[in-house]
Image (cartoon, rainbow, N blue to C red):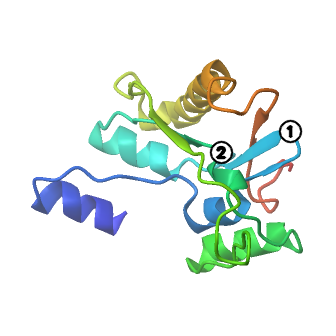
Amino acid sequence: MKAIEHVLKKTDRNPTLVPGGFAEAVWGYREGKEERYWLKNNTGFIKVAIKYGLDMVPLISYRVTTMYKTSLKNRQGRAEFAQKWKIPSMIPYGKYFLIPFHENVTNVVYDPFQISGYTIDTLHQAHADYLGYLKECFDNDKAKYGMEGVELRFIGPSTIKGAKL
Protein backbone atom coordinates (compact mmCIF):
# COMPACT_ATOMS: atom_id res chain seq x y z
CA MET A 1 0.00 0.00 0.00
CA LYS A 2 2.86 2.40 0.85
CA ALA A 3 4.46 1.93 -2.55
CA ILE A 4 1.15 2.47 -4.37
CA GLU A 5 0.40 5.62 -2.38
CA HIS A 6 3.89 6.94 -3.06
CA VAL A 7 3.45 6.47 -6.81
CA LEU A 8 0.00 8.08 -6.77
CA LYS A 9 0.89 11.06 -4.59
CA LYS A 10 4.48 11.85 -5.52
CA THR A 11 4.87 10.92 -9.18
CA ASP A 12 3.01 11.43 -12.43
CA ARG A 13 2.88 7.67 -13.04
CA ASN A 14 0.09 5.13 -12.69
CA PRO A 15 0.84 2.05 -10.61
CA THR A 16 0.26 -1.49 -11.75
CA LEU A 17 -1.08 -3.96 -9.21
CA VAL A 18 -0.66 -7.67 -9.71
CA PRO A 19 -3.36 -9.33 -7.62
CA GLY A 20 -2.15 -12.36 -5.69
CA GLY A 21 1.52 -11.42 -5.51
CA PHE A 22 3.96 -14.19 -4.68
CA ALA A 23 1.16 -16.60 -3.83
CA GLU A 24 -0.26 -16.13 -7.31
CA ALA A 25 3.13 -17.03 -8.73
CA VAL A 26 3.18 -20.21 -6.66
CA TRP A 27 -0.43 -21.22 -7.20
CA GLY A 28 -1.09 -19.80 -10.66
CA TYR A 29 -0.95 -22.93 -12.72
CA ARG A 30 -3.05 -25.38 -14.66
CA GLU A 31 -3.88 -28.79 -13.30
CA GLY A 32 -5.58 -30.93 -15.90
CA LYS A 33 -8.45 -28.87 -17.30
CA GLU A 34 -8.43 -26.29 -14.50
CA GLU A 35 -6.63 -22.94 -14.54
CA ARG A 36 -6.16 -21.60 -11.00
CA TYR A 37 -5.85 -17.95 -9.97
CA TRP A 38 -5.04 -17.00 -6.37
CA LEU A 39 -7.72 -14.31 -6.04
CA LYS A 40 -10.40 -15.85 -3.80
CA ASN A 41 -10.80 -13.73 -0.64
CA ASN A 42 -8.05 -11.40 -1.90
CA THR A 43 -9.68 -7.97 -1.72
CA GLY A 44 -6.67 -5.74 -1.02
CA PHE A 45 -6.20 -4.69 -4.64
CA ILE A 46 -9.93 -3.88 -4.94
CA LYS A 47 -9.72 -1.75 -1.79
CA VAL A 48 -6.81 0.25 -3.26
CA ALA A 49 -8.73 0.75 -6.52
CA ILE A 50 -11.83 2.00 -4.67
CA LYS A 51 -9.82 4.25 -2.35
CA TYR A 52 -8.09 6.00 -5.25
CA GLY A 53 -10.85 5.70 -7.87
CA LEU A 54 -8.71 3.56 -10.18
CA ASP A 55 -10.38 1.33 -12.74
CA MET A 56 -8.80 -2.09 -13.16
CA VAL A 57 -7.47 -3.27 -16.51
CA PRO A 58 -7.38 -7.09 -16.63
CA LEU A 59 -4.55 -8.75 -18.49
CA ILE A 60 -4.73 -12.49 -19.06
CA SER A 61 -1.66 -14.40 -20.23
CA TYR A 62 -3.10 -17.43 -21.97
CA ARG A 63 -0.96 -20.60 -21.75
CA VAL A 64 1.71 -19.00 -19.55
CA THR A 65 0.96 -21.48 -16.76
CA THR A 66 2.02 -24.41 -18.93
CA MET A 67 5.42 -22.98 -19.93
CA TYR A 68 7.03 -24.40 -16.79
CA LYS A 69 6.14 -26.82 -14.04
CA THR A 70 6.70 -26.54 -10.30
CA SER A 71 6.51 -29.04 -7.51
CA LEU A 72 3.03 -29.84 -6.25
CA LYS A 73 4.45 -30.90 -2.87
CA ASN A 74 2.96 -28.71 -0.12
CA ARG A 75 1.91 -26.17 -2.75
CA GLN A 76 -0.79 -24.67 -0.51
CA GLY A 77 1.62 -24.19 2.38
CA ARG A 78 4.27 -22.68 0.10
CA ALA A 79 1.72 -20.30 -1.43
CA GLU A 80 0.60 -19.10 2.00
CA PHE A 81 4.22 -18.77 3.15
CA ALA A 82 5.06 -16.73 0.05
CA GLN A 83 2.03 -14.47 0.60
CA LYS A 84 2.84 -13.88 4.27
CA TRP A 85 6.60 -13.33 4.00
CA LYS A 86 6.75 -11.88 0.45
CA ILE A 87 9.38 -14.45 -0.52
CA PRO A 88 9.05 -16.62 -3.64
CA SER A 89 8.80 -20.27 -2.68
CA MET A 90 8.90 -22.18 -5.93
CA ILE A 91 11.43 -23.21 -8.52
CA PRO A 92 10.03 -23.53 -12.04
CA TYR A 93 11.50 -26.05 -14.44
CA GLY A 94 11.04 -26.75 -18.13
CA LYS A 95 12.79 -28.75 -20.82
CA TYR A 96 16.39 -29.35 -19.78
CA PHE A 97 15.49 -27.53 -16.55
CA LEU A 98 15.59 -23.87 -17.72
CA ILE A 99 14.09 -23.90 -21.21
CA PRO A 100 10.30 -23.43 -21.26
CA PHE A 101 8.16 -26.29 -22.54
CA HIS A 102 6.74 -23.84 -25.09
CA GLU A 103 6.65 -20.12 -25.84
CA ASN A 104 3.13 -19.99 -27.24
CA VAL A 105 1.73 -17.33 -24.90
CA THR A 106 -0.83 -14.68 -25.80
CA ASN A 107 -1.32 -11.64 -23.56
CA VAL A 108 -4.74 -10.04 -23.86
CA VAL A 109 -5.58 -6.68 -22.28
CA TYR A 110 -9.31 -6.32 -21.66
CA ASP A 111 -11.54 -3.29 -21.28
CA PRO A 112 -11.26 -1.70 -17.84
CA PHE A 113 -13.44 -2.90 -15.01
CA GLN A 114 -15.15 0.28 -13.82
CA ILE A 115 -14.70 0.80 -10.07
CA SER A 116 -16.54 4.14 -9.85
CA GLY A 117 -19.85 2.62 -8.70
CA TYR A 118 -18.34 0.93 -5.64
CA THR A 119 -17.42 2.10 -2.14
CA ILE A 120 -15.50 0.50 0.71
CA ASP A 121 -18.91 -0.62 2.04
CA THR A 122 -19.47 -2.57 -1.20
CA LEU A 123 -15.92 -3.95 -1.35
CA HIS A 124 -17.02 -7.60 -1.36
CA GLN A 125 -19.56 -6.97 -4.12
CA ALA A 126 -16.88 -5.21 -6.18
CA HIS A 127 -14.59 -8.21 -5.66
CA ALA A 128 -17.30 -10.68 -6.70
CA ASP A 129 -18.18 -8.57 -9.74
CA TYR A 130 -14.51 -8.29 -10.75
CA LEU A 131 -13.98 -12.05 -10.52
CA GLY A 132 -17.14 -12.54 -12.59
CA TYR A 133 -15.81 -10.12 -15.20
CA LEU A 134 -12.42 -11.83 -15.26
CA LYS A 135 -14.05 -15.24 -15.72
CA GLU A 136 -16.26 -13.87 -18.51
CA CYS A 137 -13.18 -12.48 -20.29
CA PHE A 138 -11.34 -15.78 -19.88
CA ASP A 139 -14.29 -17.91 -21.03
CA ASN A 140 -14.98 -15.73 -24.08
CA ASP A 141 -11.43 -16.08 -25.42
CA LYS A 142 -10.00 -19.32 -24.03
CA ALA A 143 -10.70 -21.39 -27.18
CA LYS A 144 -9.17 -18.70 -29.40
CA TYR A 145 -5.89 -18.85 -27.44
CA GLY A 146 -5.42 -22.60 -27.05
CA MET A 147 -7.23 -23.25 -23.77
CA GLU A 148 -10.50 -24.75 -24.99
CA GLY A 149 -12.12 -26.93 -22.35
CA VAL A 150 -10.15 -25.30 -19.49
CA GLU A 151 -12.13 -23.92 -16.55
CA LEU A 152 -10.97 -20.92 -14.53
CA ARG A 153 -11.12 -21.47 -10.77
CA PHE A 154 -10.42 -18.88 -8.08
CA ILE A 155 -8.58 -20.18 -5.04
CA GLY A 156 -7.07 -18.61 -1.94
CA PRO A 157 -5.70 -19.19 1.55
CA SER A 158 -7.10 -22.19 3.40
CA THR A 159 -6.74 -20.29 6.68
CA ILE A 160 -9.63 -17.98 5.81
CA LYS A 161 -12.83 -19.33 7.26
CA GLY A 162 -14.87 -20.98 4.56
CA ALA A 163 -12.10 -20.89 1.93
CA LYS A 164 -11.92 -24.01 -0.18
CA LEU A 165 -9.42 -25.16 -2.77
Residue 59 visible in the displayed image: no
* Label placed on residue 33: 1
State the image coordinates of residue 36 (x, y, percent, origin top left). Answer: 74, 47
In depth, the one of 120 and 40 nearer the eye is 40
Residue at 86%, 68% in the rendered image:
72
Task: Please indicate whether residue 10 sits to the left or right of residue 7 in the image.
Answer: left
Closer to us: mark 2 or mark 1? 2
Task: Please indicate whether residue 66 sits to the left or right of residue 133 in the image.
Answer: right
Q: Amino acid at mark 2?
A: Arg
Residue 40 visible in the displayed image: yes
In depth, the one of 120 and 34 nearer the eye is 34
Dot 2 falls on a residue whose secondary structure is loop
Residue at 68%, 79% in the rendered image:
89
State the image coordinates of residue 80 (x, y, percent, origin top left). Answer: 72, 70
- Asked where in the image residue 159 lies, by quadrant, the reply is bottom right
Dot 1 falls on a residue whose secondary structure is loop
- Asked where in the image residue 143 lies, by quadrant, the reply is top right
Residue density around tag 2, few if under 14, some if 14–19, many if 20 or more, within 10 Å:
many
Task: Please indicate whether residue 83 sits to the left or right of residue 120 in the image.
Answer: right
Quarter of the image with the N terminus is bottom left
- Asked where in the image residue 97 lies, by quadrant, the reply is bottom right
Q: Amino acid at mark 1?
A: Lys
Q: CA distance from mark 2 to mark 1?
A: 12 Å
State the image coordinates of residue 73 (x, y, percent, origin top left). Answer: 89, 74
Of callouts 2 and 1, the N-terminal one? 1
Residue at 21%, 64% in the rendered image:
6
* Label placed on residue 63: 2
Q: Are marks 2 and 1 in contact (CB under 8 Å)?
A: no
- Vertical comparison of 112 with 9: above or below: above
- Vertical comparison of 15 with 130: above or below: below
**Total tally of numbered discs in the picture:** 2
State the image coordinates of residue 128 (x, y, percent, origin top left). Answer: 62, 30
